[in-house]
Image (cartoon, rainbow, N blue to C red):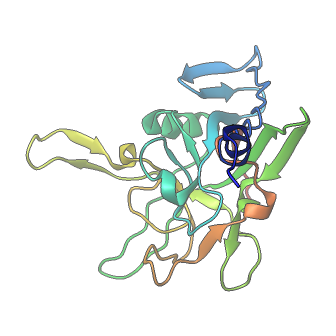
Amino acid sequence: MSISIALLSSLFLLPPDDPKPIVDNFKPDASWKSLGKDIWFDRANRRLILRGRVALRDGALEHLICSKGSKDHESTLTTEAPPKVIHAGLLLTGAEPGHPVRFEPKFEPPTGSAIAIDLEWTDNAGKIQKADARTWAIDLKTKKPLDKDLVFAGSEVFDDPRTKERIYAADDGDIATVANFPSSILDLPFRSSASDTDRLYVSNTAVMPERGTPVTIYLKPRPKR
């Protein structure tokens, strides 16, 4: 018995499901000062605001935030806000840079002001959702969300030996990392490996919105204890 063309079409040529529309109702507050693309300074609340998107939802993490097109496959969020401007904006909030991780002559963890990173996005139902960015990273050893603040390590500045140009290392995309890098603007204040065999954190898929969801990122220094 032959199968009709209409039946074949119904079995194999069904159109794909339409993707769920991503809702984005973001509007910067009129009181915020724009510092450039996707970045504002909220003087009244002494905080920095970035716009980004969800990147990695399921896998090993090196970053909470990276520059778009850099480490997207290892970061929960990406942003197009320029790293140099993020550094300058953190200074405006009153955050104090310390120093990035040092591996020689002995290990020294990153230092600097502790920075709270809060997230806000709109779900598919149009409802505003909020989260502490640390809850998007699971510690593989404890099986619990990250519970330590990242600190304002401030990255590195060095001279290119070939061009003699001054280079800001974070321009390669290392904005907020959960593995220690000398180039990180924000980093964890303890030893955290980037080695594939010793990774400490993975994305907490269960609490994250879908990939590509626009997210507002709020950076603010924690009060000193």
**Residue 52 falls left or right of residue 165:** right
Q: Nearer the viewer, residue 148 or 137?
A: 137
Residue 153 is situated, as x and y percent measured from the top left of the image, at 49, 57
Residue 174 is situated, as x and y percent measured from the top left of the image, at 45, 52
> In the orientation shown, which residue stands out farthest toward the top?
30
**Residue 181 falls left or right of residue 122:** left
Q: Is residue 126 above or below residue 217?
A: above
User: Is residue 152 something one can see in this rendering?
Assistant: no
The image quarter in which residue 182 lies: bottom left
Looking at the rendering, in which quadrant would you find the C terminus?
A: bottom right
User: Is residue 44 something one can see in this rendering?
Assistant: yes
Q: Residue at x 72, y 65 (%)?
A: 204
Looking at the rendering, in which quadrant would you find the N terminus?
A: bottom right
> In the orientation shown, which residue stands out farthest toward the left?
162
Residue 51 is situated, as x and y percent measured from the top left of the image, at 64, 33
The image quarter in which residue 163 lies: top left
Q: Residue at x 45, y 56 (%)?
A: 184
Q: How many marks?
A: 0
Residue 64 is situated, as x and y percent measured from the top left of the image, at 60, 56
Q: Residue at x 59, y 28 (%)?
A: 39
**Residue 163 falls left or right of residue 219:** left
> In the orientation shown, which residue stands out farthest toward the front?
1
Q: Is residue 30 above or below residue 16?
A: above
